[in-house]
Amino acid sequence: MDKDIKQIWQNCLKIIKDNLAHEHLYKTWFIPIKPFSLEKNILTLQVPSHFFYEYLEEHYLDLITKTIKRVIGNQVMLQYTILVDTSDKEKPITTLLSSTTSKITKENKPKPAPLNINNGVNSVNPFIMPGIKKITIPSNLNENYSFDTFVEGECNRLVRSAGYAIAKNPGKTSFNPLFIYSSVGLGKTHIANAIGLETKKNFPNSTVLYITAEQFMQQFTDASLRNERNQFLLFYQMIDVLIIDDIQFFIGKKGTEEVFFNIFNNLHNNRKQIIVTSDCSPADLKLTDRVVSRLKWGLNAELGIPDVKTRIAIIRQMLKQDGVSMPEDVIEYLAYHVNTNLRDLRGTLISLIAQSSLNHKEITLELARQIIDSIVKSVKQEITIEYIQKVVCDYLHIDVDKIFTSSRKSEVAQARQIAMYFSRKLTKNSLATIGVKCGNKDHSTVLHACKQVDNHCSTDKKFKLSLEDIEKQLHKI
């Protein structure tokens, strides 16, 4: 190639780069352009695809035209050469396009290439790369994971409220990006899908896409092998609400991080909504600093382990979905004893229903104990403050809700003090945490309660025996 044309184009690129707001736009749309020829006042540029050409014509034609006239002169015309790989792997077809017509001849028009989001699994591609017209892209959302089936509690109220706000005004709230993190099995995927479904309900014409991090990586790998990175970027820049699940799988994948960084910038700059989930907070996410910094721009919200009341509500919701009834004492027993995550809770519930159905057994507390012993107790269960409160109140025949009130009745005060005493003795929680969970008391109240119980135990033999009996009950977990 003539050195003059290369130098001329380099001069053009310097001006173009200076006039673009972000460097990633320059790298995405102008680095791939190659100078082809300059003959008879016609500058011919080589671009990767027809879609690439259409995008340049729509967004950057004015900038390109002014730059070329400034560098070369007013009489220069602009043409594009598009190299298209045919399906039968013949030599590339070359189509010449003139910027004055902004049209492409129908002959040899390139077809959109497929983009697979199913990670190589044997299935039909759910969407294809767009051509000139924007096509409908399946959202890949799970219809079962809606807000209607998501049980609200203290552990998830912030995320749920933010999700509703996003669904009403995607990309326009301060919750962009929304970064949801928690341990496994606490509802990250459910709430992410729920936000997507609610957005589609409110804005039917919006383009919402849910995708796992592993699927995203596979897409990018496939696009790179086919030399279609620009098409990959173009596709994601069409999305209105992008949901990426389990972004921690990007760790160590520098190429994927780079392309995600570019997609993030483009979507965020255009006020499109980004939702990301992870098994750890952004601070603990071992991605590059610039990716982590962007993930911190919006709302970082943690999903906690549901408390007993929420777990009871979740079990009822699961039973309602399955069309199964269950005694209240069994529901409470499951809620108190399966306190790891929602997957374990769901698995235990399914096992209990299956045992009852297959063996024609009634669902009883004893059957629930057997299931818990065989499934949950394979891993040592920790005694929780909630479980202590339940056992203490059952032993003293007091409604557990009363210890959360400001009541100073002797039987209520005593139950509260005993619950605080065993919470300090048998759990790793701080005094402040115990106080909050035992009626929103401060740490000094917890210390006073423990001293009262110790004093009563040393002077009242009957009280001491009751305390020992309660502790035996607690260790039966």
Image: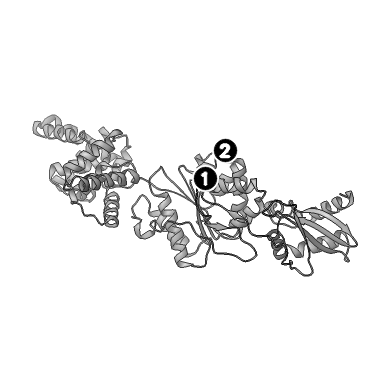
Q: In this view, does 419 lie above or below 167?
A: above
As drawn, is 34 to the left or to the right of 369? right
**Earlier sequence position, callout 1 versus callout 2:** 1
Alpha-carbon span between mark 1 and mark 2: 13 Å
Q: Position of residue 432 (x, y in %)?
A: 32, 41
- Name the one closer to the observer, 372 or 182: 372
Q: Residue furthest left?
A: 462
Q: Can residue 449 be seen in this view?
A: yes
Q: Is residue 287 above or below residue 137?
A: above
Q: Position of residue 442 (x, y in %)?
A: 30, 43
Examine the image and state in which quarter residue 428 appears. top left
Q: Which amino acid, by three-letter code, is at mark 2? A: Gly
As drawn, is 63 to the left or to the right of 253? right
Residue at position x 46%, y 67% from top?
A: 202
Q: In this view, does 363 lie above or below 132?
A: above
Examine the image and state in which quarter residue 376 appears. top left
Q: Which residue lies furthest to the top in this view?
A: 458
Disc 2 crowd, CA 10 A, few/some/many (<14, 14-19, 20+): few
Closer to the eye: label 1 or 2: 1
- Name the one closer to the observer, 179 or 354: 354
According to the picture, the residue beneath numbered tag 1 turns out to be: 214
Q: Which amino acid, by three-letter code, is at mark 1? A: Glu
Q: Where is residue 36 in the image (x, y as percent from the top left)?
A: 82, 54
Residue at position x 81%, y 60% from top?
A: 67
- Name the one closer to the observer, 229 or 289: 229
According to the picture, the residue beneath numbered tag 2 turns out to be: 252
> Which scheme is used to colour this image of the protein?
one colour
Disc 1 crowd, CA 10 A, few/some/many (<14, 14-19, 20+): some
Q: How many labels does the image show?
A: 2
Quadrant containing the C terminus in the rendered view: top left
Q: Can residue 441 be seen in this view?
A: no
Secondary-structure class at tag 1:
helix
